[in-house]
Image (tube, rainbow, N blue to C red):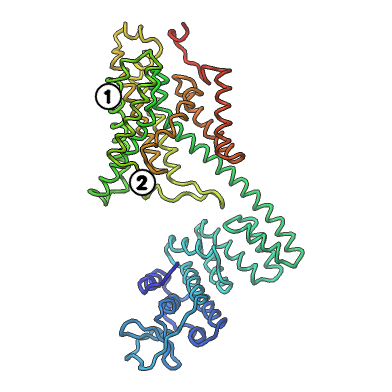
């Protein structure tokens, strides 16, 4: 909890805590809180926390809000025109005439905030307990140790128990004897939770007992090894995440270029169109259906596919159809189209980037290890890429359109002779590839800002994936995308992003020289002849 504590917050906190028999608070602790000096007031806060009485939260909250006062030797809580005895909780019949405010300095306010967080540890609400444990993990007062242990004994949630174990160990390092400190150091080594390494390093710097220092060194090695595995897991996920993004960006190109032989330099702009379509759907939901905003992606996905597919089919019908078999003219024409699309988007939406907001279910992440958090946005994109890949595979291998596309790819003349409408297949295949590019744009909008130049960042990588995997090979596209994703992230961790990109490009150049057909060569009569 940060900032000013409101009356409503304190009342909600008190009502959320477990119900205990009505009994007066420790009078001595309350009076020491009001009339004591410096450390005595801090000790009083610790005593109230140790009691674990829900009404202690009300008293401490009143102190934080400036509502705790003294009337002679009595401590009262004043809210509006009502006064309540801080010890017994009884309402006073009349407001005392002479009252003095109890002033809390910054140090005392910080202790109050920590105490209120500690009291939340006994709340029946799991979310409240987890938030309190995370807050206390950043730093807790030694006086809170009894309540932390009490909460730990009753806690059944594994995640909260891990945090509480770490908090208790860190507090025991400050207050315990040698035996207790040894046990705390071992606990930190086994848990490897938040701040375990800094705490163990501080033990090595300040500890005078040789046995504790030796145990701290052993525990520090355990924590370092666990953190190293966390880095590896994070690197693995980062490679999968980047590979899935490259796969989405290149999958449409694998159809338009790999299956149809069209060098489409406007492919990146089709990705950009899908991202802007998602942006438009988001704004429509925010304006007209704010209650269903978290589900706007369910509508944005088909819209992004349809808009990009429609633009792609129009391009194929009006420009690209007349340039089949002329790669240089196709390249120049599609490059010009890409410039036109960029300028069109700038005219409609402006030159500045726009932001697409993540739905609530894509916010946050999964804390796999102490130093590894897997964002939900990335996890959803990985799953989405797998779903799109499965859909494309089913379409190409289990549908009539897929059969026609494969037939035209392997031998256009023979396919035409047996009645395949090659011109219509070209249009539908190009629309399919463009629609998949739109899906890539929809996914990319969830991990960064959307701008007119969005597609320019992925067009080169998309061509690299398709060429490396093998022209016309879906499996090759998957392997190449994941391989390049892992290679980029691995090299980035060693040499930085710029050198990593250079090394990858050099590798692809050498690989293509040795194996021009890519990882998987396309087979068919037209190819073999």
> Taking 281 as reference, is 103 above or below it?
below
- For the image shown, how many numbered marks are present on the structure? 2
Q: Residue at x 58, y 26 (%)?
A: 507
Q: Give residue 325's quadrant in the image.
A: top left
* Pick the front one: 301 or 323: 323
Q: Residue at x 74, y 68 (%)?
A: 208
Disc 2, SS: loop
Disc 1, SS: helix
Q: Residue at x 54, y 85 (%)?
A: 37
Residue 28 located left or right of residue 349: right
Residue assigned mark 1: 314
Residue 21 located left or right of residue 343: right
* Mark 2 to mark 1 CA distance (whole Å): 28 Å
Rendered-image quadrant of the N terminus: bottom left
Q: Give residue 24's quadrant in the image.
A: bottom left
The residue carrying pointer 1 sits among few (fewer than 14), some (14 to 19) or many (20 or more) residues within 10 Å by Cα, namely some
Instruction: From the top left corner, tell me how far across and down residue 453 is, in percent.
Output: 39, 36
* Pick the front one: 387 or 453: 453
Marks 2 & 1, CB-CB < 8 Å contact: no
Taking the view exactly as shown, the residue that stands out farthest to the right is 210
Residue assigned mark 2: 355
Instruction: From the top left corner, tell me how far across and down residue 86 is, in percent.
Output: 42, 84
């Amino acid at each position: 909890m940060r900032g000013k504590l409101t009356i409503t917050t304190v009342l909600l906190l008190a009502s959320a805590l477990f119900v205990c028999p009505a009994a007066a608070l420790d009078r001595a602790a309350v009076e020491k809180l009001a009339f004591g000096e410096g450390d005595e007031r801090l000790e009083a806060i610790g005593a109230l926390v140790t009691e674990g009485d829900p009404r202690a939260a009300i008293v401490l909250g009143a102190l934080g809000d400036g509502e705790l006062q003294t009337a002679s030797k009595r401590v009262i809580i004043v809210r509006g025109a009502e006064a309540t005895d801080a010890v017994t909780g009884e309402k006073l019949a009349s407001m005392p005439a002479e009252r003095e405010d109890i002033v809390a300095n910054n140090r005392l306010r910080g202790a109050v905030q920590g105490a209120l967080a500690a009291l939340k540890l006994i709340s029946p609400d799991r979310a409240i307990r987890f938030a309190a444990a995370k807050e206390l993990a950043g730093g807790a007062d030694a006086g809170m140790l009894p309540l932390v242990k009490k909460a730990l004994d009753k806690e059944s949630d594994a995640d909260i128990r891990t945090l509480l174990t770490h908090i208790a160990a860190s507090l025991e390092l400050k207050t315990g004897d040698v035996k207790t400190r040894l046990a705390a150091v071992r606990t930190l080594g086994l848990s490897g939770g938040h701040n375990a390494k800094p705490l163990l390093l501080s033990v090595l710097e300040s500890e005078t007992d040789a046995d504790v220092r030796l145990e701290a060194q052993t525990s520090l090695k355990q924590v370092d090894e666990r953190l190293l595995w966390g880095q590896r897991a994070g690197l693995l996920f980062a490679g999968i995440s980047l590979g899935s993004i490259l796969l989405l960006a290149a999958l449409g190109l694998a159809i338009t270029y790999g299956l149809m032989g069209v060098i489409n330099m406007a492919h990146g702009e089709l990705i950009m169109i899908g991202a802007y379509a998602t942006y438009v759907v988001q704004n429509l939901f925010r304006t007209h259906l704010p209650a269903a905003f978290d589900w706007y992606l369910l509508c944005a996905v088909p819209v992004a596919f349809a808009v990009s597919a429609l633009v792609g089919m129009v391009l194929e019908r009006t420009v690209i159809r007349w340039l089949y078999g002329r790669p240089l003219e196709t390249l120049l024409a599609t490059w010009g189209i890409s410039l036109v699309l960029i300028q069109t988007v700038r005219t409609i939406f402006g030159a500045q980037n726009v932001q697409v907001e993540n739905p609530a279910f894509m916010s946050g992440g999964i804390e796999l290890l102490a130093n590894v958090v897997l964002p939900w946005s990335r996890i959803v994109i990985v799953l989405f890429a797998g779903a799109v890949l499965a859909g494309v595979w089913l379409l190409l291998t289990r549908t009539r359109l897929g059969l026609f596309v494969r037939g035209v790819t392997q031998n256009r003349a023979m396919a035409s002779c047996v009645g395949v409408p090659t011109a219509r297949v070209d249009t539908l295949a190009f629309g399919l590839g463009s629609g998949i590019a739109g899906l890539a744009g929809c996914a990319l909008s969830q991990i960064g800002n959307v701008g007119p130049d969005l597609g320019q960042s992925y067009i080169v990588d998309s061509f690299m994936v398709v060429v490396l995997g093998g022209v016309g090979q879906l499996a090759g596209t998957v392997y190449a995308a994941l391989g390049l994703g892992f290679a980029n992230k691995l090299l980035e961790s060693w040499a930085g992003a710029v050198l990593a990109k250079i090394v990858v490009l050099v590798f692809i150049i050498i690989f293509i020289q040795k194996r021009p057909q890519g990882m998987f060569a396309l087979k068919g009569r037209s190819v073999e002849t």
